[in-house]
Amino acid sequence: MQTGTSIQTPRIQQIVQAAARLVLVAITLATAAVDFGLRLGLTGKSRDRRARCEWNSRWSRRLLRCIHLHAEYSGEPPRAGLLVSNHMGYLDIIVLSARQPAVFVSRADVRGWPVFGFLTQLAGTLFIRRERRGDVAPLNEQMAAGLRAGLVVVVFPEGTSSDGRQVLPFFSSLLQPAVTVGCPVTPAFIRYELDDGSVAEEVSYWGDMTFGPHFLNLLTKRAIRAHVRFGAARPPGDDRKPLARELQQAVRDLGGV
């Protein structure tokens, strides 16, 4: 009987911890929404994409603390231009935003996620339905407008998230705005560490995983560490296809994969 109790105790502690963190996350996100209304809505800045990026960056840092995720950064993030990175899941957006205000390009289905979907819209995220080629041209125009305004625009050119063990080939279509505008492109690599579990199965969000169960399980972890390496900015050149190959290799080199 004593053995059974000792086995159950850690699990009970995990559940209590996850519940407490979930409440904290809910309060933080609700407060963030109120802050958006007061700082941006009432002041008429809700259409200012830079202000929305700064709001997102500020609240991303608070959200990282809520889920006990410690992020370390090396290299200098860009102050303008296109930032490309490997992609392991929704945490990537929070981790990158916490370091540098930016406009993110994300899958359209993220808009339907509970609470987070609403907040990504407030942050000024640009959404794309990758199965619809007709979405690419309007999206590229929006990206180009952001780049011309001197903003950082973040894309994940792999086209999907993965377990992080490799960097998938880069699709070149979302690199076209950088070529069109002639702005610098910066590669980055994100890596996670987890002492009490599997990064591939419990931190990365990929395949047929479902957001709710994945996030709740994430909250049971003692702590998560993220490491982000920023590479050197480079000119985009005049052809997005060789640029895609060069950037994929640059990201792989940063991560040593």
Image (cartoon, rainbow, N blue to C red):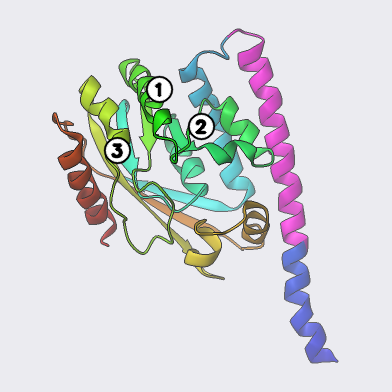
Q: Is residue 15 left or right of residue 172?
A: right
Q: Which residue is mark 3?
A: 76
Q: Looking at the image, which residue is at 64% across and 42% down?
A: 113
At label 2, the amino acid type is Ser
The residue sitting at 30% across, 43% down in the picture is: 171
Determine contact: label 1, label 2, CB under 8 Å.
no
Given contact means CB atoms under 8 Å apart, are the residues at marks 3 and 2 in contact? no
Number of residues whose C-alpha sits closer than 10 Å to that of mark 3, classed few (under 14), some (14–19) or many (20 or more)? some
Q: Which residue is mark 2?
A: 57
Q: Per the image, is 144 magenta?
A: no
Q: Callout 1, which amino acid?
A: Pro
Residue 24 lies, in percent from the top left, at 72, 45
The residue located at (34%, 45%) in the rendering is: 85
Secondary-structure class at tag 3: loop
Earlier sequence position, callout 1 versus callout 3: 3
Where is residue 75 drawn, in percent x and y?
Answer: 28, 43
Tell me which numbered mark, 1 or 2, is placed earlier along the sequence: 2
Q: Is residue 18 magenta?
A: yes
Residue 110 in which image quadrant: top right
The residue pinned by badge 1 equals: 138
CA–CA distance in space, label 3 to label 2: 16 Å
- Work out whether residue 204 or residue 243 is closer to the camera in this orientation and state it: 243
- Residue 75 in sight: no
Segment tinted magenta in the rendering: 16-44
